[in-house]
Structures are given as structure tokens and as C-alpha cells.
Image: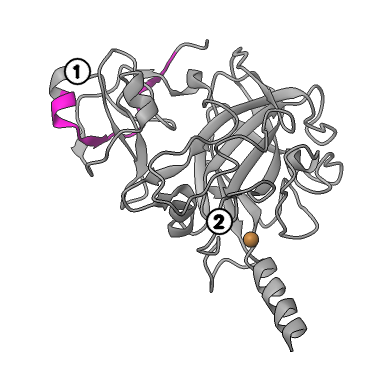
Amino acid sequence: MKAILAVLAAAAVANAHFTMQYIWNNGVDEGHNTYIRVPPNNNPVTDVSSTDLTCNVNGLSGSSVGTATIPAGATITFEWHQHDQRTGEDPISGGHKGPVQVYIAKAPSTAASFNGQGAVWTKIYSSGLVNPSSQQWATDVVNSNSGKHSVKIPASLPAGEYLLRAEIIALHVASSYPGAQFYIGCAQVKISGGGSANPPKISIPGTYKGSDPGITVNIYNNLQSYTAPGGAVWSAQIYYSDCPENFTVGTLHKPKAEDERTRHLVQLVTGLDNEPQAMVGSGTWFRAARPAYAQVCPPSSIRRRSRFISLYGTCREGPNT
Ligand SMILES: [Cu+2]
């Protein structure tokens, strides 16, 4: 009896895992497991030194996978599910708490033949402990958004073929290593248009260490801050200026500690209408945790107000550094 229960418990845990199953190109659903290197099952990777960390199990090539053409500056949405279904269960089962990140790597030739090894990956999105007081994680936001999270592909990246790597790290058993669960989905894309940016790059595997505070961490002790592994989001995509004056006031939200340090008081959350919202700090240029649509404002007045604003689409992207 004990053995049977153990087997059932193990099966239940396995069923709670999830995979990335859809990408959306500027709001258009590209279809189930299309342009995606599909792993053999929904189990996580736990060894940060394994090449499975790059693009999941069997993910070092994508010769049988198509490559999506996307325009420079496209918004790509990733959609995750436990099983091959979009309804009837949480996309990510509730116990899986942790950060959501997105990286991009330029293929030397085709995306389909690119193994993603070496220092080739640039982080373009990261969301972790969204609200310490309510212990809301990026995974909770993905769940409430039907399994989806989005990133604007920096328009300054050169034209060519790329791997897009979305990552969700579940930290529910991460207080010792190995324990953190890495859920990885890689999509093959070809950027048309584009610029000439040469962003900083890391290795996956290589950069992540078992001892990283974002990988080995006890999340059940009223954690107040969290630093995801892999370093900072590449900032060239998230400097904006020349934005319009009109805005609407949204929800009050405390800025992230790292933004406070740099005096750039900008953080984005997903509003009730699922549109991005930003809080604006001082300076002509400002940073956001993800692509922002916001204005340049008199710093003191905005700082005092400490409010979110939401604006749409007319800001200019910053310098390609
Ligand atoms: Cu799981």
C-alpha cells in the first residue's frame, strides 16, 4: 500500500510540471508546439551544468522545427501549460513559484542548426518576486494571464536567425541544490529589419551556479527580495524618451530595490486590462523591468506622486549600447 501511494504521489508531481507550447507573434497565435523545440516530456531540468539547460532535453538542434519570421521590435508572447490543453487547470500548478525570464541568442547561420552553446545569450526579460508583501511571484502572474508572458524583442538587434529561450524557475524545493526546477522553452525565429546592437552575452549552461542565491533559496520564510540568476536584463531595449504627456494613473506599487539604487523608479506590472503600466522616476531617460510606454516628467512631482502611469506605444527606444 505504501509503495502504491508513493507511485501515485510521484505521478501527481510529474503531472504538475509544464512546458512552453505556444508563441504569439505580435498577438497572432502561431499554433501548438509550432516553431518550438519540443522536449520529450514536461519534466524540469535540475542540473545547471547540463546542456539540457540550454533548450531543454533534446534541445540542441531543431532541424525538424520551423522558424518564425518576426519583424524587428515584435512583441512575442510565450504560453505555458501542464498538459496539451488550454483550459481546465492552472497553466502552472500553484505550488510552482519563481521567476520568469527570456533570453535571445543569434545563430551563426540558421536557428534550426544552432545549439546555443557558449557565450551567446542575452537576457531581455526578467520578473521574479513581484510583490513581497503578498508573496506574489512572476509565476502567479503567468497563471492569472492564462499561461502567457510577453517580451518586446529589442528593435536594435541585427536581422538574422535567433533562438528565443523562455525560462521559468520553480523554487518550491530549492532550499538545497539540486532542487530548483528549470522549465525551458526555445523557439526559432528570424528577425527581419533590425539594427546593429551588440549586447552583452552569457553562457547557458555556464553562467548559472548551484550556489546562486536565485537558485538555492528558501522561499517560504517571508522572502523580501529575490535576485534571479543570469545577471541584469540588457538595458539597451528599455530606455525610452520622447513620450507623450497624457497618461492615466494606475495602481500604486513599490519600486524594486535595484531600481531604487540606480534612482530609476520604473517598474512594470500587468494591469487589470493586461496592458503594461509603468511608474516613472527621475531623469530624461529611465529604465523599466520590461518594455515601457511612459513619459519624461518633472522628476520631483512624479517622485512625490509615486504612481503608475499607463501609456501606449509612442515612446522612442533608447541608444544601442
Ligand atoms: Cu513540476
What residue type is disc 1 on?
A: Pro
Q: Position of residue 131 (x, y in %)?
A: 35, 46
Q: Which residue is mark 2?
A: 172
Q: Which residue is mark 1?
A: 299
Residue 91, placed above or below residue 133: below
| Image side of residue 275 versus residue 217, left or right | left
Q: Nearer the viewer, residue 121 or 247?
A: 121
| Image side of residue 127 versus residue 278, left or right | right
Residue 294, placed above or below residue 277: above
Q: Which residues are magenta?
A: 302-318
Quadrant hosting residue 101: top right
Q: Position of residue 145 (x, y in %)?
A: 45, 56
Magenta stretch encompasses residue 262: no
Identify which residue is drawn at 53% across, 36% down.
228
- Which SS class for mark 2? loop
Q: Nearer the viewer, residue 111 or 298?
A: 298
- Which SS class for mark 1? helix
What residue type is disc 2 on?
A: His
Q: Which colouring convention does the figure follow?
A: one colour
Q: Position of residue 321 (x, y in %)?
A: 52, 10
Q: Position of residue 57 (x, y in %)?
A: 80, 49
Q: Nearer the viewer, residue 213 or 248?
A: 213
Local packing at callout 2 (Cα closer than 10 Å; few below 14, some 14-19, many 20+) is: some
Which of disc 2 and disc 1 is earlier in sequence?
Answer: 2
Identify which residue is drawn at 71% across, 51% down.
34
| Image quarter where ligand 1 lies | bottom right
